[in-house]
Amino acid sequence: MGFQDVPVTSVFTAAVLSGSPFMEVPGKALVNTFLRQAVWKYRRRYAFTFNVYPYFDPNLHMNPGSQHNCSSALERAICWDAPHCLAQAIMIAARQHMQMLTGRPDDIFWIGEIGWSSPRANALHTDMRSCDNFSSLATFEKFYNGFLQWDLVLQGPVRSPDHIFYFTLRDALNFGVQEFFGLLVSCESLGCKITSQDFHAEQCELQKSQLSWRAFAFMGLGLLLFLSFACTCLFVRCPPLQRLVHFLEGDSMKASSRVQVSDTE
């Protein structure tokens, strides 16, 4: 089929790095077993993919003696170019755990998601929920600018990720929970959340759909299907109607027989 060299992957959160080398909790997550079997089956085609979110890291806490100041934790969470930076530390740990499993330092390694939320994501339940600066637009901008300037090199004796996917283009619901990781608020936004001081978004008119007839077509099709279903149910559940249909069919057959006899004569 031509797909024998296409990479195969399954995406995990960084929480699976809690195991040795990966999480293995019967009844909850047998990640170690899954990855071992995936590597055995797909060999070098298998791509290890992890979502890395310093934003949700439960190990981030307020400055000592403070209930709202998180400057120390914030510096670790949004930096990119040092081993103590959370993004770097998690990626380095992921590469090390991969090597523990396969014995190889160069397996395919993807970061499926990494990003920052502003305003605060409803799913944020760590101490950082009480730090306004943590989810501010200024912090969002610093994190994204750091990502753009990062050369993807990890500060350690490990190979860098092969691909990194930034999350995300626009704000969205995640299993019904509102998140704000998007560079845009919505698909209809005329500008990004972060802009230069003199930037002004141009106004534009949304093009009206030229296929408005589709709504009526689908409504007609739905009505036709409903009527067909209703007639079928009525026929099945109404014996008098069945007898009427059979009677009409009988008359039709008799009329057809008379026509054939007349033609023969």
Image: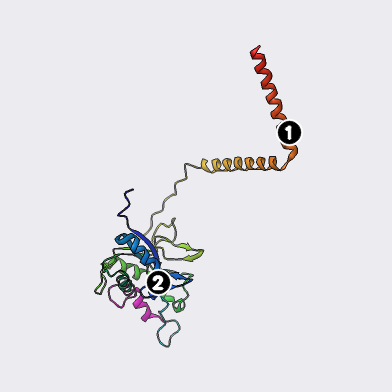
In the picture provided, is 75 more to the left or to the right than 239?
left
Residue in the foreground of this view, choosing between 8 and 215:
8
Residue 79 falls within the magenta-colored stretch: yes
Secondary structure, mark 2, is: helix
Q: Identify whether 63 is placed above or below 125.
A: below
- Alpha-carbon neighbours of circle 2 within 10 Å: few (<14), some, or many (≥20)? some
Could one spot residue 116 in this view of the protein? no
Look at mark 1 in the image and give the residue it sits on.
244
Within 10 Å of disc 1 (Cα), the crowding (few <14, some 14-19, many 20+) is: few
Which region shows up in magenta?
69-89
**Alpha carbon of mark 2 to alpha carbon of mark 1: how far?**
68 Å
Which residue does the image show at 48% across and 42% down from the upper left? Answer: 211
Q: Which residue lies furthest to the top in this view?
A: 265
Q: In which quarter of the image is residue 118?
A: bottom left
Labelled pair 2, 1 in contact (Cβ < 8 Å): no
Depth check: give the residue in front, 150 or 47. 47
Relative to the observer, which residue lies in front, 178 or 208?
A: 178
Amino acid bearing label 2: Val
* Residue 107 visible in the displayed image: yes
Could you tell me which secondary element the residue under label 1 belongs to? helix
Q: Depth check: 235 or 127 in front?
A: 235
What is the three-letter code of the residue carrying label 1? Leu
Residue 52: quarter of image? bottom left
Q: Position of residue 219 (x, y in %)?
A: 57, 43
Toward the left, the furthest residue is 157
- In the picture of the structure, the residue carrying the numbered disc 2 is 16
Furthest-right residue in view?
A: 240
